[in-house]
Amino acid sequence: MQEVFASLGTGFGVALAPFNIMLVLIGCFAGTLIGALPGIGPINGVAILLPIAYGLGLPPESALILLAGIYYGAEYGGRISSILLNVPGDAGAVMTTLDGNPMAKRGEAGRALSLSAIASFVGGTFAVILMSLFGPALARFAVTFSPSDYVALMVFAFASLASLVGKNPWKTLMGALIGLMLATMGIDGNTGVPRFTFGVPDLLAGIDFLIVVIGLFGMAELFHLVEQQVTGKLQTLPVDNSFVRMADLARTKWTILRASIIGFFIGILPGTGASVASAVAYGAEKRAAGADTSEFGKGDMRGLAAPEAANNAAASGAMVPMLTLGIPGSGTTAILLGALMLFNVQPGPLLFTQHPEIAWGLIASMYVGNVALLIINLPLVGLFARMLTIPQHYLTPLIAILAFIGVYSIVGNPFDLFLIILLGMFGWLLRKMEFPLAPVILGFVLGGLFEDNLRRALSISAGDWEILVESWKSLALYGLAVLAVVLPATLSYLNKRRARDRAPT
């Protein structure tokens, strides 16, 4: 432990250098703006700015500090469009829309933004502390997860969906199935056979996540606004000067702690990421609430704090296998891994001894960055909330412009502009039929992970399905999946029975 604190001291010596503090602030601010743009997300932000960081001739530790600031700054920024516009900034912010946007619609945008900023700060800082103390040991455990263990983890995540969102569990599961179907479009990586492409060459590569999230959320929201304008039902959104209160923090303190732990441990599993962490944390919080779940999905503070703490904890957790083992924990850390190798630095167990200024300087900069993000974001809460005062006839084209620019600047294919319109119409119809859209996105994100790991597991066992239940980790996750389905139904039945027994006869 003494060695850890001594190494952290070395790291803070690097991170607190005036030039590196400036890079942290620039990265955090730029990342917040990038994350606020619907669909861009941290992976695209870091990928776009990596050549700039390299071209400036920065030292390796300074370049990594800048790119990492953009990374977790974008995780912060993703909440802004999720809460204000109901359009997730990235996959990890999908769950934030469920309770964040309803809070904004009832005039509590400032309260929602400030609570999410504090939850993100606690989740990120808590994860960095765990990374400093236990990172290498946890990374060694994480890489023991086999493809069959990942299959069990995905089954647990899907089982959580049943009680996750929406009034009707069947519609929730149907939404997840729709997401799974979208995830299977394109050429099968194993056989080379086109699946569900309908003879359209542009669909052979599948549908990019950016297209799905912008179409089903951004364009669907646009069509919803247009419908309200045409029918004369459009209402001005109330905006006040609300801010998070001590009572709010007292109510959500255990929520944030639970979600931070869940997010960090899921984050260190290579390939999972913030989307899985936020979904599992939201489901866990809803089950922890017991019978007090009536406000979830309508603007419950716990439903906002849980995914925000989890996705920022997962972002920090994903750095653990990258630094200690040279294995990227997420798409964004894969780019950071490439950045290290671009500077001729080999990540892995020897990084902490051969280049302590890079490893510990990066970790120390994350402490500084989380504080900087809180300082940057809290004063801007009122400014962000005022965005809701923009007249709706201006807001509608603004959403359309952000959607089209976001898609075309990243994907660069005109066909995808028509595809987001088609998906937007589909998402609008699903909303009218009261299908929750979050399970569709999560089904799409988790579907690819599920299929890839299932194929790997069966390839290892030559088609023997018993491999899926051989590991104790798999059995534990299957057990949790069963509890996730059975426990809410059992508690609901017992509560109804108690209410019936107490009713006067």
Image (tube, rainbow, N blue to C red):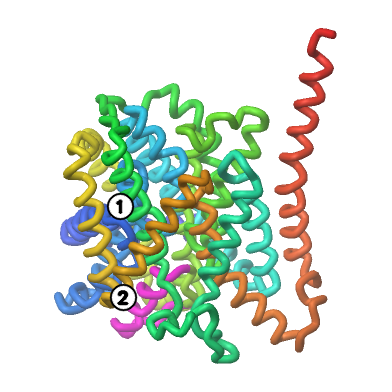
Looking at the image, residue 246 lies above or below residue 179: above
Q: Position of residue 114 (x, y in %)?
A: 33, 35
Query: Mainly helix, strand or loop, the magenta region?
Result: helix
- Judge the density around disc 2: few (<14), some (14-19), many (≥20) Cα neighbours within 10 Å: few
Residue at 51% x, 69% y is 182
Disc 1 secondary structure class: helix
Q: Position of residue 3 (x, y in %)?
A: 48, 60
Q: Quadrant of the C terminus?
A: top right
In this picture, which residue range is highlighted in magenta?
330-348
Residue 341 colored in magenta in the image: yes
Residue situated furthest bottom in the rendering = 192
Residue 7 colored in magenta in the image: no
Nearer to us in this view, 18 or 25: 25
Q: Position of residue 312 (x, y in %)?
A: 43, 52
From where the camera sits, is residue 312 visible? Answer: no
- Left/right placement of residue 6 relative to residue 408 reads right
Residue at 53% x, 40% y is 257
Q: Which residue is mark 1?
A: 369
Q: Which residue is mark 2?
A: 415
